[in-house]
Amino acid sequence: MTAPPRIEFGKASPETYAAMLSLSKYTNECGLEASLLELVKTRASQINGCAYCLQMHTRDARKMGETEERLHMLPAWRETAIYTPRERAALAWTEALTLLTEGHAPDADYELVRAQFNEAEIAKLTLAVAVINSWNRIAVGLRFVPKP
């Protein structure tokens, strides 16, 4: 059974909601591949246990043509070759930044991302990871309820 939402975020503080939407809009339009961003959002949401965001981003990924196999394998992405080197680097960076308390963004993960992304792209990817982690914390903390 799902607990009821604690507050309606957008109604409680429309300007705060608008600020988050603005950050999301920027990261969605920053020039990084939309499919890669959905993998990043999904992986961070898996780690953070955010059902609301998982539902949203797996649906969005499917609409973009992402396969069920790649979505199902995402928690074990290191164990399979179905992700490109660029996706693997982005996923490693996503995990490093999402799990900061476990390693403080290790140099090895940064080197992976640096080999696949230029500096501007690294900045954009880093912001995208920060934004989805923020959304996860908002959605989990305020108990956003996934839609059936």
Image (cartoon, rainbow, N blue to C red):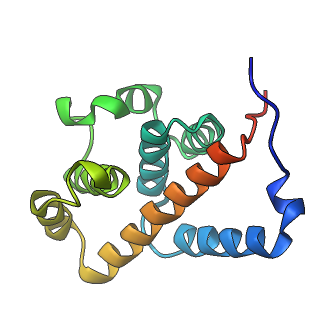
Residue 13 drawn at (x, y percent): 83, 68
Where is residue 12, by image quadrant?
Answer: bottom right
For the N terminus, which image quadrant?
Answer: top right
Q: Return the residue found at the far top.
A: 1
Q: Residue at x 46, y 57 (%)?
A: 37
- Going by the image, does 105 lie left or right of 130? left
Q: Residue at x 11, y 65 (%)?
A: 111
Residue 146 drawn at (x, y percent): 73, 34
Check the image and report above or below for 74 versus 141.
above
Q: Return the residue found at the far right.
A: 11
Q: Nearer the viewer, residue 64 or 94?
A: 94
Q: Nearer the viewer, residue 103 or 126?
A: 103
- Going by the image, does 111 lie left or right of 36? left
Q: Residue at x 53, y 64 (%)?
A: 131
For the C terminus, which image quadrant?
Answer: top right
Q: Residue at x 61, y 34 (%)?
A: 51
* Whether residue 87 can be seen here: no
- Please give the count of numbered marks on the rendered protein: 0
Q: Return the residue found at the far bottom.
A: 120
- Going by the image, does 33 lie left or right of 10? left
* Whether residue 140 can be seen here: yes
Q: Nearer the viewer, residue 122 or 107?
A: 107
Residue 90 drawn at (x, y percent): 30, 56
